[in-house]
Amino acid sequence: NSLIPDNAKLKSEEVEGQTVECASSHANQTSLIDTPTLAFPSISTADFQFNHEKAADIIVEKVAEFSNKFENARLVLVDLTHKSKILSLVKAKAAEKNIDTRKFFTHVGDITRLYSTGALRCNVIANASNWRLKPGGGGVNAAIFNAAGPELESATKEKVKSLSPGNAVVVPLSSSSPLFAREGVTHVIHVLGPNMNPQRPNCLNNDYNKGCKILQDAYTSLFEGFASIVR
Ligand code: AR6
């Protein structure tokens, strides 16, 4: 709580481009600020070229499995634009499955600026990582390492040296990291998904039997990692 600046407490939340006034009383503000929230990008669906329809099914399946396990926590799928195909697919499939929109929703924005530009509080963000857990390489990985500063690279190195596909690692962020100070992000969870891009390591050559299993494992590992922080 103390991490959130006072002047921020009266801000409204923006969900899917719609501004929802949600902090009119002190009690409401407190409950909202206290709600642990994981923002995550769609793993493997850009640089790693994983099929969007299949990825959307897996995201919704895993969200349905995990969202009920969290009594007081939210999962938010984030992408950069309103034109995002993966966000539209997931939104439609989540509605079909009647997933509680208080526990899971989609949001358009930069995952490194969710609070400062979208007024969306997320204490944990996920990264679609590479196996070496190195900065750069484009996509959300480059954005998160850039925004977090050198603190994220050193904290990551302290935890693990590499990741195999389908796994995730929780990295606590130092309070000196700009991502912590500006956005209120206390942890980054690196996730390595399946790769269908022949230009990248561990390419599965369109083997979607393996690919779907690895993507399911990746989300299980991500949501279990988040659960370990919330508990
Ligand atoms: N905020 C929110 N979502 C984003 C952002 C951002 N700043 N940037 C990208 N996305 P990708 P992958 C979305 O390619 O397919 C890296 O080079 C994007 O639109 O980042 O798992 C790593 O080092 C898409 O929906 O990850 C790996 O080598 C999603 O994030 C490789 O790419 C994931 O896109 C991983 O490829």
Image (spheres, rainbow, N blue to C red):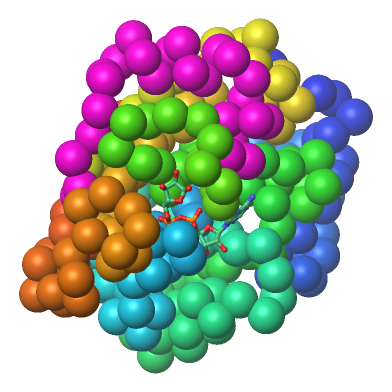
Which quarter of the image is occupied by the C terminus?
Answer: top left
Residue depicted at x 56% and y 51%: 139
Horizontal and vertical percent position of residue 137: 51, 43
User: Camera-side residue: 189 or 226?
Assistant: 189
Residue depicted at x 51% and y 30%: 135
Residue depicted at x 81% and y 59%: 21
- Classify residue 35 by image quadrant: top right
Q: Is residue 146 on the magenta stretch?
A: yes
Q: Is residue 21 on the magenta stretch?
A: no
Which quarter of the image is occupied by the N terminus?
Answer: top right
- Classify residue 84 by image quadrant: bottom right
Horizontal and vertical percent position of residue 229: 36, 29
User: Camera-side residue: 66 or 179?
Assistant: 179
Task: Name, please, the residue furthest toward the front.
Answer: 199
Horizontal and vertical percent position of residue 212: 18, 70
Q: Does residue 121 appear in this view?
A: no
Residue depicted at x 10% and y 67%: 210
Magenta stretch?
142-166
Q: Main secondary structure of the magenta part?
A: helix
